[in-house]
Amino acid sequence: MEALILEPSLYTVKAILILDNDGDRLFAKPSVKEQKAFEKNIFNKTHRTDSEIALLEGLTVVYKSSIDLYFYVIGSSYENELMLMAVLNCLFDSLSQMLRKNVEKRALLENMEGLFLAVDEIVDGGVILESDPQQVVHRVLQSAKEQIKWSLLR
């Protein structure tokens, strides 16, 4: 039988999700209405387990929980779990630094702009741009300073 040879691709990450304790979406990139059923399914399969990796509907899912949040990074079934885990850890560690180690629902909701900026620094269109949380936090702070500067000039 002929072995399946896959072409290398930079498009590693299919989606990033953050769900609360009830499995409700707080953040999703990309955001699709049909994704709600998938999110409920992934939450039901992962919220009571101690593992960090799951295979679901032909996708590789790496995840981590913190207090009342569940963080997910999703790639295709043939994707390297270590690459996906590096994205997950970078996102979590960046948020932890930005929220002063208070990674919980209320703090995240109060700092959604920082979350959006961090995700944009880590992944763009499925391509991993950065995996160092220090660099992500630095760039998010730079972006915030630029936004303040432009708002003062108006």
Image (tube, rainbow, N blue to C red):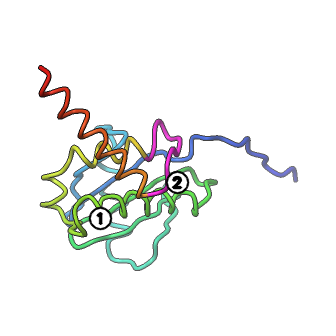
Determine which residue is flagged by label 2.
59
**Residue 136, how many percent across, how many down?**
39, 50
In the structure shown, which secondary structural element does the residue marked by tag 2 occupy?
strand
Q: Choose the circle earlier in sequence order: 2 or 1.
A: 2
38 and 151: which one is in front? 151
Residue 123 colored in magenta in the image: yes
Please name the residue shown 30% across and 38% down the image: 143
Tag of residue 145: none
Span of residues in magenta: 122-132
Q: Is residue 61 left or right of residue 66?
A: right
**Residue 11, how many percent across, how many down?**
57, 41
Q: Residue 64 appears in which quarter of the rendering? A: bottom left
Given the image, on which type of amino acid does mark 2 rest?
Answer: Leu
Q: Quadrant of the C terminus?
A: top left
In the structure shown, which secondary structural element does the residue marked by tag 1 occupy?
helix
Q: Is residue 59 left or right of residue 97?
A: right
Tag of residue 96: 1
